[in-house]
């Protein structure tokens, strides 16, 4: 998560993407049969963990959820609504429904996270890493708190890899002195597009042929 | 854990509560058959993890255990004594013996953690969250390091929920401009009392009726 | 990991030790059948997690891997090479090959981590803790992210204990006003030596006789 200084359009993408991240945590909590506190923490970590870790690493304050504390109330509301109305048979449709806003989040949060590190004059690879952390580590920390091997580490889906390449693109467009709007939103759009195609085409990363002689 | 600027009475509560938190880590270490280093880390995380995470999030230094480094020696001593004299048959009585000091810790650390965030002019929900983190996340991180799903996430006991409501009460009493003694220690006492009642009455949070149609 | 302000000799030890830590992560990733992103994260956490956690706790910036960002490119290269050429039958020989550079890292990173905390005028036990964290917590966090109980917690090998004693020695030699070269590198050498002996003699820590009456 990053600061919402942008347009209403950007804000609406950020809200839907953050809610998608949170819902991935709600679903993980449902599958582990967590109580209300567990669901709230896991949803919160999924939604805000990536940006928070980035800001801890960059020693950057205030966090998004401190500056925009209303989002925490929204998160509580989302968890209460989910626990009141959501049933097991709703999980598959929810999983599908959050794919597109999740892809929007992948694009936007990666690009904004990279830009934040660039504005702090971090080295290229650190900027790329911060972009990836912003978009991917909410899900990683969600799985760690759920006592699961992080899905992002073994599902062989091009998710973090899309973030890596898109983040590198943000860095390069910045070096070319393009307008920030272009250098952030063009890669964000491309990442989102590639993620959607990757899901629909079921692209997989090559796996480590460790048994091969 | 928070800074001990208070009375000898408060200090004695803090010591007994911190030792109770540490002993919960020692017991977790025993159940996982950890070695001396493992027991020390898990006990230390259980005792100081919540306050440390709060201070990292609030960018606040020095940590309690840096300012009062003697407590770390005390923790090492506690672990060595436990590993020398504690046997499996002592675990159930220890679990019962730490319930009351643990409840004291829930009340006091939640209230003091909330007050710290209030003094830093954080938004209401962030203050509440910091109170909850202070009291609850030592146990959460203990379980994460023990490769267990955090008990606080699924045991359906009103522990974090008591912290949440008590923390909100600290915020409201502060808004009413009551003396800090009252606004911290009244909620602390109530949280402790409710926790004791919750244990004795075996109160459970309503669970998510996810299979219900 | 600590800053490399030392000689080419020290730098060569740091590189080989960091690569050994990273390879322990690569092997853990292989055993969990992780994809490229998972292998990279786990290797990176194993290599840089201890020093990064120390720096977060000490509120110290920039991190080693920000100041020397080339190491991150090197890490990516290492992971790609491993995933291209390493096969399951190479794991045992790799495990043996990294034992000595890992022991070098145990000695050097513990001593340098302790010295960093001493230079910040931390209390003795905090300096010792920071030395231990620097050398040991990369491996701990590697295992947490791999959803495993950290080996350092239960393997009963004198690894963290060697770091603890060596770190205490760094503190004492500093108190004796010896040259920093001596107070850092003498304990570093001794720790490395004891670690090598401990492996060859299969030394084990006494375990908690919890079933004993």
Image: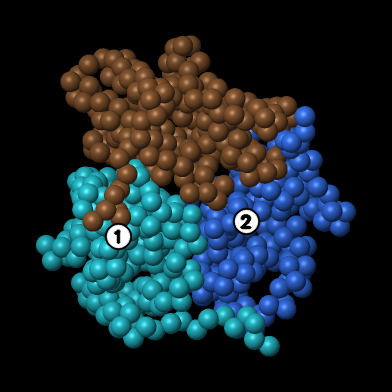
Chain colours: A cyan, B brown, C blue
Q: Find disc 2 in the rendering and name its residue.
A: C139
Q: In which quarter of the image is residue A53?
A: bottom left
Q: In which quarter of the image is the C terminus of chain A?
A: bottom right
Q: Quadrant of the N terminus of chain A?
A: bottom left
Q: In the displayed structure, would residue B53 be above or below residue C107?
A: above
Q: In the displayed structure, would residue B9 be above or below residue B85?
A: above
Marks 2 and 1, how far apart at CA: 38 Å
State the residue at coordinates (38%, 39%).
B156
Mark 1 Cα-neighbour bin, 10 Å: few <14, some 14–19, many ≥20: some
- Name the outermost residue toward the front: B213
Where is residue C78? Give x, y as percent. Answer: 60, 75
Q: In the displayed structure, would residue B110 be above or below residue A139?
A: above
Q: In which quarter of the image is residue B202?
A: top left
- Name the outermost residue toward the bottom: A213
| Chain containing the residue with disc 2 | C
Q: Quadrant of residue A159?
A: bottom left
Mark 2 Cα-neighbour bin, 10 Å: few <14, some 14–19, many ≥20: many
- Name the outermost residue toward the left: A8
State the residue at coordinates (59%, 29%).
B92
Q: How many marks?
A: 2
Where is residue C187? Give x, y as percent. Answer: 77, 46
Which type of secondary structure does the marked residue at label 2 adopt?
helix
Of the pair C204 and C2, the residue shown nearer to us: C204
Where is residue B104? Give x, y as percent. Answer: 44, 22
Which type of secondary structure does the marked residue at label 1 adopt?
helix
Task: Tell me: B189 left or right of C123.
Answer: left
Q: State the mark number for residue A88.
A: 1
Task: Tell me: B189 left or right of B66.
Answer: left
């Amino acid at each position: 998560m990053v600061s919402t200084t942008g347009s209403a359009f950007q804000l609406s993408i950020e809200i839907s993407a953050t809610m998608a991240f949170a819902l991935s945590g709600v679903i993980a909590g449902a599958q582990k049969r967590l109580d209300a506190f567990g669901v709230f923490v896991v949803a919160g970590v999924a939604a805000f963990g990536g940006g928070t870790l980035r800001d801890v690493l960059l020693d950057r304050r205030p966090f998004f959820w401190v500056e925009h504390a209303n989002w925490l109330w929204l998160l509580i509301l989302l968890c209460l609504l989910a626990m009141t109305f959501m049933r097991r048979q709703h999980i598959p449709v929810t999983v599908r429904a959050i794919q597109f806003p999740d892809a929007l989040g992948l694009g936007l949060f990666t690009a904004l996270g990279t830009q934040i590190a660039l504005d702090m004059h971090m080295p290229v690879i650190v900027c790329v890493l911060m972009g990836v952390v912003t978009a991917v580590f909410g899900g990683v920390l969600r799985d760690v708190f759920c006592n699961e091997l992080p899905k992002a580490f073994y599902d062989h889906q091009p998710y973090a890899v899309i973030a890596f390449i898109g983040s590198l693109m943000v860095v390069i467009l910045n070096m070319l002195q393009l307008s920030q709007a272009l250098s952030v939103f063009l890669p964000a759009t491309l990442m989102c597009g590639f993620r959607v195609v990757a899901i629909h085409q079921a692209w997989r990363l090559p796996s480590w042929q460790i048994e091969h002689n």
